[in-house]
Image (cartoon, rainbow, N blue to C red):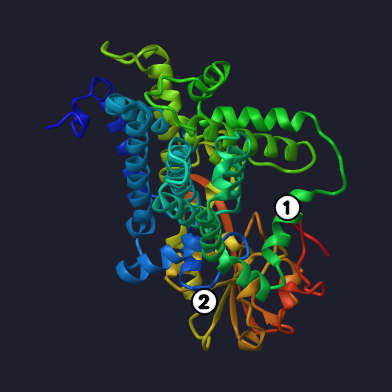
Amino acid sequence: MSKRWGLFESPVWRWGRWFLLGFLALRLGFWLTAFPNPDEAYYWLWGQKPGFSYYDHPPLHAWVQGMFGAALGRSALVLRLPNLLSSGLLGFTFYHICRYLYGDQARDRFWLVMLIVASSPLYFWYLGLAWHDHWLVTFAVVSSFLFVRYVDRSVEHPGQGSGRDLYGAALFLGLAGLCKYNAVFVGLGCLALVLADKRRRQVLGDRRLYLALGLLALVLSPILIWNVQHDFFSFRFYRDRTSGDGLTINLLQPVVFLALCGLTLGPIQSWSIGRWLKTRGQTGLTRSSCYPALGLWVFGLSTVAFTALSTVSVALFYWNILAYPLLLPLLSDQFYRPQLPPPARVGQLAIAQGLGLFVSAALVTYYTVMPLGTFFGAVDPDGAALFGWPQVAQAVTAQTEGLDNPLLLTTDYRSASALAYTLDNPDVLAISGRLDQFDFWYDAPALEGRDTVLLGETWHPICPAHRAMFDRVDPPETVEVRRFGQVLQTYEIVRGYGFRAGPEGYPLSPDYPLAYTSDGEHCLP
């Protein structure tokens, strides 16, 4: 086998193979056995109702879920099969990045990148869940690599940058934008890369660049179409989510945000970034490339933007997920030792693997066995939402007996999505005080007057405002979900008769009667 493809001859592979196989076993165990996280079920449900886009996020992940479900049916394997494909494409791209930057060192560098990625709790978690993030990261890395190749070639031979690389970069950046809006930081990073160096500014005179921008706009057009059709609700959602109530500066929040970013990325990974930054981005590249500069721009723009946002509003650590992936091949320098196996700084690399395996095993246990905090008396409604759905669905189905064409309702998007997935019934609907995608599916004329089974739970209870939307309701039935003798969640099921659906677009109206404090928890009058 040639050295080019002899990946398994690498001393780094021989040193780290059992770690990598451990991560693979945990990932496969999760993919095959874990009930869908409520958001996974939510996005699966989007796939059953195709649209140009959706309220909470752009549409690509939903389109993929819809296609896989239509072709292969509904199962945990099918739900997360796209993750396997995106992970394969991401690994393939990282290998080619290592070949491009490091030449004959590629196979050792590649396995170092795999060890760094696999042991990062952030990427084990978010590349494993059937959310939008796994496609986002993959397409962002592919787009960035293609753009780097175009710019490098254009600098070396003006006017000869590959149009295929340029158009590919635009296409994949558009696909990343169809996953999540924070793909904008890749686009901003590419723009900053070009403007910051006069040698690279010559690409601004390449007319193909503007054709590529047109292709990017075309790929992203479904988002604009949906928002034009729905009064720009998606854009308003993100504006409202990040604006806060007035300008109140909290200098502690940036510290918390950066600490969470560092811990979830991994302490050793974060330490490696710190060492890399001290060298001003210098690594052992075997060629001249703008790749380190682009990685630094994307990292800096994303991290600074969300850190600044955290001083005045909410900023969640996983919003910064695109800050790091371009740096991972560069971080291999911290552990690379040519001709002298095993890897350099083997102690730190082993610590990263041990910590990563511990956290990954804890996450898989959380999703498949038990929310561990429950044993210590912690209330964890997110963890509780992962268990007991066959039992709850059976109780809901029993309540539908004797009803003519009953409507299935819940008090939150999470429970509606999980119930819809369990019953394989995309017509389950959430009615709640929180604006979500269900409010755009609310068809008042089709719902008016129907008999209903309504499901609530401790976190999002059935309130008097819910009951007032019916002509009458039966006394509730209670269902307790237990795990190893511990009560995880208590559900309440009521039968309602004569649902008063209100006017068209009722949930989007200020007259909509449902209201909560915070994200549920307590009913308001």
Q: In front of the other: label 2 or label 1?
A: 1
Q: Position of residue 51 (x, y in %)?
A: 53, 73
Judge from the rendering whether residue 156 lies leftward or rightward of residue 453; answer left or right: left
Q: Position of residue 162 (x, y in %)?
A: 40, 48
Closer-to-camera residue (434/334): 334
Q: Position of residue 316 (x, y in %)?
A: 64, 41
Q: Is residue 288 above or below residue 346?
A: below
Judge from the rendering whether residue 441 lies leftward or rightward of residue 328; answer left or right: right
Residue behind mark 1 = 241
Q: Is residue 53 something that shows in the picture?
A: no
Residue behind mark 2 = 427
Quarter-of-image position of residue 247: top right
Q: Position of residue 37 (x, y in %)?
A: 49, 53
Q: Is residue 388 above or below residue 28?
A: below
In which quadrant is the N terminus drawn? top left
Label 2 – label 1 distance at C-alpha:
28 Å
Q: Residue furthest left?
A: 1
Disc 1 element: helix
Q: Is residue 52 above or below residue 128?
A: below
Disc 2 element: loop
**Residue under the point 82% across and 75% down:** 511
Closer-to-camera residue (21/496): 21
Neighbourhood count class around disc 1 (C-alpha, 10 Å): few under 14, some 14–19, many 20 upward: few
In which quadrant is the C terminus drawn? bottom right
Closer-to-camera residue (340/351): 340
